[in-house]
Amino acid sequence: MVAKHDPHDEPFFREWNTHRHLTRSRTRSTQLQHALGLTRTLPTPAILIVGSKGKGTATAAATSALAKNATVGTVTSPPLRHNRERIRINGRAISHTEYARLSELAHNAIDELPPVTDGYLPPSGIYTQVGIAYLVQQGVDYLVIEEGLGGLSDDVSLFDYLTIGITQIFMEHGDILGNSISAITHDLLGTITPATTNIVTHYNQPQEVWDYLGRHEPETPEPELVQASTMTATNLEIGARAAATLSGRYVPIGEQELILPARASTHTPSHSDALWMVDAGINPEGIQHALTRATEELGHVHVLAGLPDVKDVDACLEVLEPFPVTFVGAGRDYLDYTHLATHGPVLTVEDACEQALASGRNILAVGTMSFAGAVLEFLDAPTHFWW
């Protein structure tokens, strides 16, 4: 969920708000695809980015590399401050006026569908499909799509992609994608089809990933392995190399070239000399990476941690143990913080940020994307452009 809601969000969340007691409906997603005039074969060369973390960084890098010589439409998920961030052209979120048009396109397509019976249209799926339809209408040269929530179980699997970029896969969203690495791998990599000619992957994957790719030879192309000096650099390189498979031209993307909010991004609050770093690292490795970056760039930090029950709270807290921490709960209408509350009081985002600002200390805010978005909203940080 984003920090700032818009009346034009309504059609995207209509069925989820009303029928979330059901499940995501594959049949209904296919019906939406037909209503939008889309088919499995996209009219524009496309990259799909899947994985557990780092997808947004790889997606931004692929977009930037392709946009050096072309017009690139991107569908990314989740957003931070506003849902229009999900749909971008050459790295910039569509305008409020364009978002109103996108909303109308979604409203008209959903109105053509039969009544809900077996399940709902997931918001991420509607944004993916309507975003693709809108960007194709705009005549973009390439598409870069980030999975919304899963692979086979997500609307991204309704389409074929020439290139699949795979960031690191680990135990994430097990309640939705499957309660094992094998199940999560099968869901995410099920997006590889006979139309896929290129696979670019993070070098450090669980054995289940290599087993899956090897099991599908010779149909599955030999994956290109990517390794760089840091986690962020590796994800940037995945995006750059994925872009090269479509354009035929490799364009390296350095971290300094992109503005990536909530990816160890640094901000200065108004009327303060303190520095705040915001990172959507929500597993122990991601939090350790954020802590390392924060201590290197900011020195001593106080941590604001938003860790809902669906994450490995104890393992994350173990990494945070040497640091002073304030616990924060964001998105309480759909996330629970019962486990975190056993370790201390859980503040609202506004209260935690106000206290942190008043302290004058340097801050690391780490947690879910919804938490990161709420902190960036508090800081009034720009999130609608990547460069």
Image (tube, helix red, strand yellow):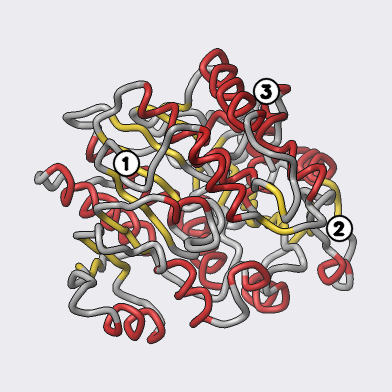
| Residue identified by numbered label 1 | 42
Residue 229, how many percent across, how many down? 28, 65
Residue 73, how many percent across, how many down? 36, 32
Measuring 62% from the left and 52% from the top, which residue is drawn there? 364
**Category of crowding for the residue at label 1, using alpha-carbon neighbours closer than 10 angstroms: few (below 14), some (14–19), many (at least 20):** some
| Residue identified by numbered label 3 | 8
| Mark drawn on residue 346 | 2
Q: In this image, 327 relative to 59: left or right?
A: right
Any part of residue 352 in sight: yes
**Category of crowding for the residue at label 3, using alpha-carbon neighbours closer than 10 angstroms: few (below 14), some (14–19), many (at least 20):** some
Amino acid type, label 1: Leu
Residue ranking furthest to the left: 248
Of the image marks 1 and 2, the number of the one nearer the N terminus: 1
Q: Secondary structure at mark 2?
A: strand
- The answer to whether the residues at label 1 and label 3 have Cβ atoms under 8 Å apart is no
Above-or-below relation of 200 to 129: below
Front in this rendered view, residue 363 or 224:
224
Above-or-below relation of 180 to 86: below
Amino acid type, label 3: His
Q: In this image, 350 relative to 134: left or right?
A: right
**Category of crowding for the residue at label 2, using alpha-carbon neighbours closer than 10 angstroms: few (below 14), some (14–19), many (at least 20):** many
- The answer to whether the residues at label 2 and label 3 have Cβ atoms under 8 Å apart is no
Q: Secondary structure at mark 3?
A: helix
Q: CA distance from mark 1 to mark 3?
A: 26 Å
Measuring 60% from the left and 75% from the top, which residue is drawn there? 178
Q: Nearer the viewer, mark 1 or mark 2?
A: 1
Q: Nearer the viewer, mark 1 or mark 3?
A: 1
